[in-house]
Amino acid sequence: MKKTMIVSAFIMMSAISWALDDTPENRSKQADRYMATSSTKDMIQDFVDKMELQLPVERRQGFKDFMTKHFDFARIDSAVRNATIKVFTADEIKALADFYGSPEGKSAMKKFGAYMAEVMPFVESEMARAISEIDREVKEAKTKK
């Protein structure tokens, strides 16, 4: 029993020693690794490509042009990197970089545009429904006054 406890304690201490110090420098270094694992531009382009397939053929090119014409992908990448550093710890960013750099992570990212194209119409319709409900409640509140 003592041996098991000693081995468990050693394993736990070892895991703690492998953790990165959560410093701005380590967050920045890991964010660079994470940003190198996936392309924001490719992800957005894939999403737009999948979304346009839901439109009539004659509207697809206009939609695609409208959605990408004014995108500044360098600014988007900068915002993603800054938010990553601000929100996540160095170990969390390392885990993201490790996952998205893995074969499974790369495969998942290739499917992300299709995933978002599936989810976004529902999210958009749910937002429209919620806004309608808010408008209805505001009108009711005004008529009660």
Image: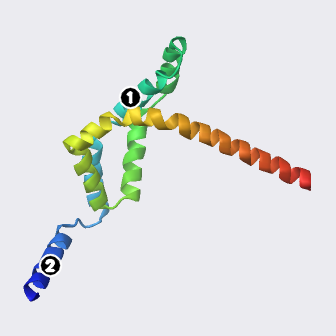
Q: Is residue 83 left or right of residue 139?
A: left
- Across and down, in percent, residue 17 comes to 17, 71
- Across and down, in percent, residue 14 comes to 14, 73
Residue at the top extreme of this rendering: 58
Judging from the image, what secondary structure is the residue with disc 2 in?
helix
Does residue 55 show up? yes
- Across and down, in percent, residue 54 comes to 50, 23
Residue at the (90%, 55%) spot, across then down: 144
Quadrant including the N terminus: bottom left
Q: Is residue 144 above or below residue 4?
A: above
Residue at the (72%, 42%) spot, across then down: 132
C-alpha gap between disc 1 and disc 2: 46 Å
Under mark 2, the amino acid is Ser
Quadrant housing residue 104: top left
Q: Is residue 144 above or below residue 116?
A: below
Does residue 25 show up? no
Residue at the (25%, 49%) spot, across then down: 99
Read off the residue under disc 1: 46
Judging from the image, what secondary structure is the residue with disc 1 in?
helix
In this rendered view, identify the residue nearer to me: 59 or 133: 133
Q: Are marks 1 and 2 in contact (CB under 8 Å)?
A: no
Answer few, some or many: residues within 10 Å of disc 1's Cα (few below 14, many 20 plus, some between 14 and 19).
many
First along the sequence among labels 1 and 2: 2
Q: Is residue 11 left or right of residue 48?
A: left
Read off the residue under disc 2: 8
Q: Is residue 9 above or below residue 119?
A: below
